[in-house]
Amino acid sequence: MRGELRVEVRDSQGTAVAASAELVSEANQVRRTIQIAPDGRATVQDLPFGIYRLSLTAENFAPWNKLIEIVPKCRARFGNSRRSAGDDRG
């Protein structure tokens, strides 16, 4: 099983920004270069779980970087069974 990272880059006004990014995990020996589209979005798939440094650069903006963790996605399904008032089963 592997993880996925979805990136969305916007300026302070909420406008999408095209950018370049680098995603690095020394522990997993992963280095990915990402081009963020003009709509400000990119998806990186097939990532081993672990800690990464995400670095973003965009024209006319200060560089940005942050440590992130790729973890398994948790999904759960819950069932609900109801019984009628006179049902005495288990």
Image (cartoon, helix red, strand yellow):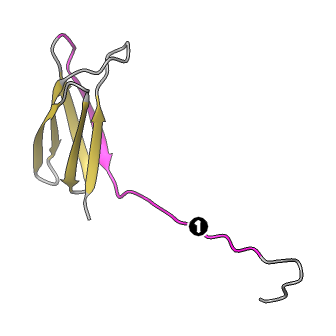
Q: Nearer the viewer, residue 13 or 31?
A: 13
SS state under label 1: loop
Residue 35 screen position, x and y as percent: 13, 32
Which quadrant of the structure image shows residue 24? Answer: top left
The overriding secondary structure of the stretch rendered in magenta is: loop
**What segment is highlighted magenta in the picture?**
60-82
Residue 49 screen position, x and y as percent: 26, 56
Residue at 83% x, 77% y: name it.
84
Residue 72 screen position, x and y as percent: 35, 58
Please say if 41 is above or below 69. Answer: above
- The total of numbered circles placed on residues is 1
**Is residue 32 left or right of 16 when viewed as pictured?**
left
Residue lying farthest bottom?
89
Residue 31 screen position, x and y as percent: 10, 44
Residue at 26% x, 65% y: name it.
1
Indicate yes or no whether the magenta region holds residue 30.
no
Mark 1 surroundings: few (<14), some (14-19) or many (≥20) residues within 10 A: few
Which quadrant of the structure image shows residue 10? Answer: top left
Q: Quadrant of the C terminus?
A: bottom right
* Residue type at the position of mark 1: Phe
**Is residue 9 left or right of 33 when viewed as pictured?**
right
Residue carrying label 1: 78
